[in-house]
Image (cartoon, rainbow, N blue to C red):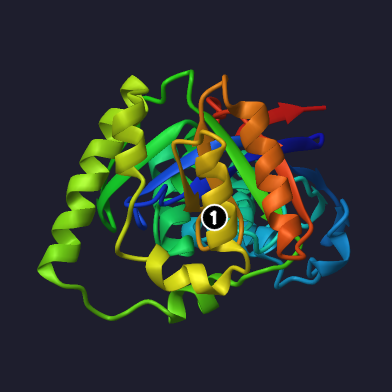
């Protein structure tokens, strides 16, 4: 078998009220190349390459092993090359790309014995929740409902006039730290608030209805507790709303902030987002992206 590459998109999870169940794939990618070899090796390229572990505890390799463990087979030696395009520990699903990439790569090397559904189940089990791995695997915006062995996955239509813009600050925030600040329980009112806003958000994404989008991105489950972990959150939010954005949310666990806007306000929103971060002394990369509609892909040669 010759080498092949699995390309996996970044993801933005939660989208406000869709905590742990809603996510969208974005046009930002990690590339994982698999080459049969006589021994295991891991090479990483990209600006954040020195931060990636290159021994056998590497998440891509652990995901690769998971398929062979599931099949009850010994894994073959493989040379892995990771080309990083998704920032690490920024709330853009970098770990999900490694999980999906490793599972898909192993499945190809094993002769494709596992179905897409089986690979999805393994990915969700490894990640612990579906909001990142499902859109990373399938592309588009996806709602995942269920529990182990019985997931129902529903693609959420995304209106072409809704542009995702991410502000990626130059500091990291671990998912563990972001989860640690969340309460163990919520009031009935808070639960009802999020249920209502998630329902409205799904319809707003489909129709592009501006009034619905401005209302629907609000959340009471995770953002009120996490926003204090992100320096400049309130300043950036104020500026992008004044610039004409529909709203702003924390991407995944943060610290990346995601704003949705239309094409008319795109340039103003991106400029103001960068200026707002600068006001609080933070360097941030501002990227106007699009929805990825392919998900993880495999290319040979």
Residue sitting at the far front: 242
Query: Compared to 289, does 34 lie above or below?
Result: below
Locate the N terminus by quadrant: top right
Kindly identify the residue that appears in the image at 62 percent across and 36 percent down: 269
Q: Is residue 56 above or below residue 298?
A: below
Q: Is residue 103 visible?
A: no
Q: Residue 142: give x, y in percent of width and height.
A: 38, 38
Left or right of residue 212: residue 160: right
| Image location of residue 91, percent across then percent down | 58, 57
Residue 154 location, quadrant: top left
- Which residue occupies the foreground of this view, 168 or 103? 168
Indicate the position of residue 300 as horizontal and vertical percent values. 76, 27
Quarter of the image with the C terminus is: top right
| Residue depicted at 23% across the width and 54% down the height | 194
Name the one closer to the observer, 16 or 35.
16
At horizontal 51% and vertical 33% (from top left) the residue drawn is 244
Tell me if residue 22 can be seen. Answer: yes
Instruction: Give the side of residue 146 with respect to residue 207, left or right.
Output: left
Left or right: 92 as drawn, with respect to 148: right
Instruction: Please give the residue where the numbered disc 1 appears in the rendered image.
Output: 67
- Badge 1 local density, few (<14 within 10 Å), some, or many (20+)? many
Instruction: Give the residue displayed 70% in from the left and 73% down from the top.
Output: 57
The secondary element bearing badge 1 is classed as helix
x then y, percent, for residue 29? 70, 40
**What count of labels does the image hold?**
1
Q: Nearer the viewer, residue 223 or 149?
A: 223
């Amino acid at each position: 078998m010759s080498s092949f590459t699995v390309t996996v998109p970044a993801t933005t999870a939660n989208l406000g009220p869709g905590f742990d169940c809603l996510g969208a794939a974005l046009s930002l990618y990690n590339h994982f190349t698999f080459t049969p070899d006589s021994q295991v090796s891991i090479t990483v390229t990209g600006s954040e390459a020195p931060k990636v572990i290159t021994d056998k505890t590497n998440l891509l390799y652990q995901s690769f092993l998971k398929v062979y463990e599931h099949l009850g087979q010994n894994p073959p030696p493989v040379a892995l090359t990771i080309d990083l395009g998704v920032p690490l520990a920024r709330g853009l699903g970098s770990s999900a790309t490694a999980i999906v990439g490793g599972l898909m790569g192993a499945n190809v090397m094993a002769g494709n014995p596992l179905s897409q559904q089986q690979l999805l189940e393994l990915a969700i089990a490894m990640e612990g929740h579906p909001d990142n791995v499902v859109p990373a695997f399938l592309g588009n915006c996806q709602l995942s409902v269920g529990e182990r062995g019985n997931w129902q996955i529903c693609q959420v239509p995304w209106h072409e006039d809704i542009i995702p813009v991410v502000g990626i600050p130059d500091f990291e925030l671990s998912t563990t730290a972001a989860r640690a600040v969340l309460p163990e329980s919520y009031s009935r009112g808070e639960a009802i608030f999020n249920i209502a806003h998630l329902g409205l958000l799904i319809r707003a994404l489909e129709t592009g209805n501006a009034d619905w989008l401005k209302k629907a991105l609000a959340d009471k489950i995770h953002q009120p507790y996490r926003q204090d972990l992100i320096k400049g959150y309130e300043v950036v939010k104020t500026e992008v709303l004044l610039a004409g954005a529909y709203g702003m949310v924390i991407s995944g666990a943060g610290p990346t902030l995601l704003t949705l806007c239309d094409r008319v306000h795109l340039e103003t929103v991106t400029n103001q987002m960068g200026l707002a971060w600068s006001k609080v002394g933070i360097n941030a990369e501002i990227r106007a992206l699009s929805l990825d509609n392919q998900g993880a892909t495999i290319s040979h040669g």
